[in-house]
Structures are given as structure tokens and as C-alpha cells.
Image (spheres, rainbow, N blue to C red):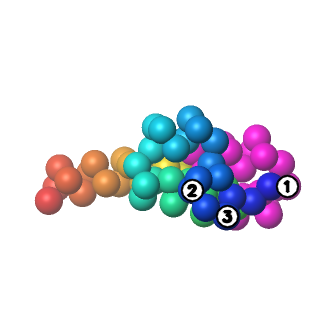
Amino acid sequence: MLYTSNEDLPLEIRTRLSEAYQDLYRAAFNSAIHWYGEASKAHQVALSAVKMQSAMDRNAFVRG
């Protein structure tokens, strides 16, 4: 199952993540579902991508 828009994302993702992080989650999920073929693994990959980007954003803020 691919997510074509952020409105298609699970409610938990839509309510917990900003629009930018929803975009990242959706792109990572869609890529991972092609690679792994299973939604649970794609979800893990997408959450990891969001966490890594969030950490990078925090580090940029501290250094900036």
C-alpha cells in the first residue's frame, strides 16, 4: 500500500508529525515498501528516517 498524500497516512502519524515530517515519512515509507514488500518494516524505516532528520534538525539549531 502506497501513500499518495499525507491525508492517507495513519491518524497517529498525521497528528504527531508536522507537515514536513509527514512528507518525509510518506516518501520513506513508499520507498521502503517497494524495497521490503511489507508494511511493518516500511513503517520502521519511515520512523527511523523521521528520527534521524529530527536529530539533524536539532543539531543544526544548536550549532546555528
Q: Secondary structure at mark 2?
A: helix
- Under tag 3, what secondary structure? loop
User: Where residue 4 is drawn, which disc sits there?
Assistant: 3
Provide the secondary structure element on which disc 1 rests.
Answer: loop
Disc marking residue 37: 1
Q: Assess whether mark 2 and mark 1 are in contact (beta carbons under 8 angstroms).
A: no
The mark lying in front, picked from 3 and 1, is 3
Give how far across and how far down residue 18 sits, in percent. Answer: 40, 49
- Mark 1 or mark 2, earlier in chain: 2
Gap between marks 3 and 1 measured at Cα: 17 Å
Going 56% across and 35% down the picture, which residue do you hit? 12
Per the image, the residue denoted by label 2 is 6
Please tell me whether residue 16 is drawn above or below residue 5 in the rendered image. Answer: above
Quarter location, residue 40 = top right
- Coordinates of residue 19 in the picture (x, y in percent): 43, 55
Residue type beneath disc 2: Asn
Q: Nearer the viewer, residue 10 or 40?
A: 10
Label 1 or label 2, whichever lies nearer to me, is: 2
What residue range appears in magenta?
A: 31-47
Left of 61 or right of it: where is 21?
Answer: right
How many numbered circles does the render carry? Answer: 3
**Other residues around mark 3 within 10 Å, as few (<14) / some (14–19) / many (≥20):** few
Q: Residue at x 78, y 46 (%)?
A: 39
The verdict on residue 45 being magenta is: yes
Q: Residue 18, can we see it? A: yes
Q: Residue furthest right?
A: 37
Residue, far front: 7
Picture coordinates of residue 22 (x, y %)?
Answer: 50, 53
Image quadrant assignment for residue 35: bottom right
Residue 31 position in % (x across, y down)? 70, 64
Numbered badge on residue 58: none
Query: What type is the residue that disc 1 sits on?
Result: Gly
